[in-house]
Image (spheres, grey):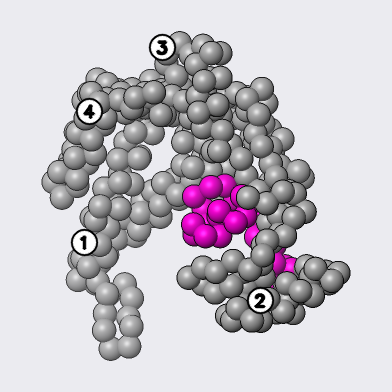
Amino acid sequence: MRSVDVLKKVILATTILGSALLLGACDSNETIAKVGNDSITKEQLYKEMKTAKGAETLQSMIETEVLTQKYKVTDKEVKDEIENLKKKYPSEEEFKATLTQNNINTDEQLNKVTKDSLLRFKALSDGVKVTDKDLETFYEQNKDKYLTIDASHILVEKQDEAEKILKELKNGAKFDEMAKKHSKDGSAIKGGELGTFGKGSMVKEFEEAAFALKENEMSNVVKTQFGYHIIKVNKIIEKNLKNNKDEIKQDYLVAKGNYPKAMSKLLKDAKVEIKDKDFKDAVQQRIDQYDMSAQNPAKG
């Protein structure tokens, strides 16, 4: 729902729209790609586009259009939101790196994603009163969600090798140098640096060990399905309520089921009509899901 959260839908929508425009310029049996002696035709590609993913993208585009008709987002709001996002990163370089990782490579893309996120937030909060007490209670109940860690690790295949590396680390060897020398993970080139992550991002054994550590503390050998790890927590980052109120308010409203309720009403009022029969059922199913969610909001 936040800016980076809607990115995939925006990029996918752009890709499918571009493909559709290209397809319109050629015959249905025209070959658009060849793999060895086999051909891929316009008709085959269009059928692939009419999958659940294609319907999801169309639904996202419909939602954006409905929201644009209902709410107004100014250029200043977009600019201010981008500035607020930047403040959440230690540097401009890290902010840009995150955008690049999410395939946001131009100012136009960033503005589009941010505007879509703001539109959804307006629908989410329209006419809903949220008290400070509501947010405090929600924050305390979901504190783990707002805790992230910056960690590094060394991954090897055998336990005895991991134990040997751990012994060297305890005797003063530098973690990043040992990671570059021994780790079999792709992060080895960066000294084992994994970046920041929250709960639910890693396999259970790794997560439990990592989140049990204090800053600058190193784990014992941890076994997972990938091999044997030694984990080091570089930094613990906790988002407090005071400085992240808008984000936490949005999460609270999402948990309460306000977005499905708002979209269900907006889509009905907009009288959406799907012209392509192949997409019609799939998109209608998504609208029906909003109706069900609106009738059965989350508790708590």
Residue 164 placed where, x, y %?
Answer: 72, 79
268 lies above or below 224 = above
- First along the sequence among labels 4 and 3: 3
Report the span colored magenta. 185-211
Residue 218 placed where, x, y %?
Answer: 72, 60
Residue bearing the label numbered 2: 162
Q: Nearer the viewer, residue 167 or 117?
A: 167
- First along the sequence among labels 3 and 1: 1
Which of the numbered marks, if any, corresponds to residue 228? none
- Note whether residue 79 is visible: no
- First along the sequence among labels 2 and 1: 1
The type of residue carrying mark 1 is Lys
Q: Nearer the viewer, residue 30 or 184?
A: 184
Do the residues under discs 4 and 3 have CB atoms within 8 angstroms?
no
Q: CA distance from mark 2 to mark 4?
A: 53 Å
Q: Quadrant of residue 70?
A: top left
- First along the sequence among labels 1 and 4: 1
Using a 10 Å C-alpha cutoff, classify the residue at mark 4 as few (fewer than 14 neighbours), some (14 to 19) or many (20 or more).
some
Residue bearing the label numbered 3: 127
Q: CA distance from mark 4 to mark 3?
A: 19 Å
Residue 234 placed where, x, y %?
Answer: 74, 53
Do the residues under discs 3 and 2 have CB atoms within 8 angstroms?
no
Q: CA distance from mark 2 to mark 1?
A: 50 Å
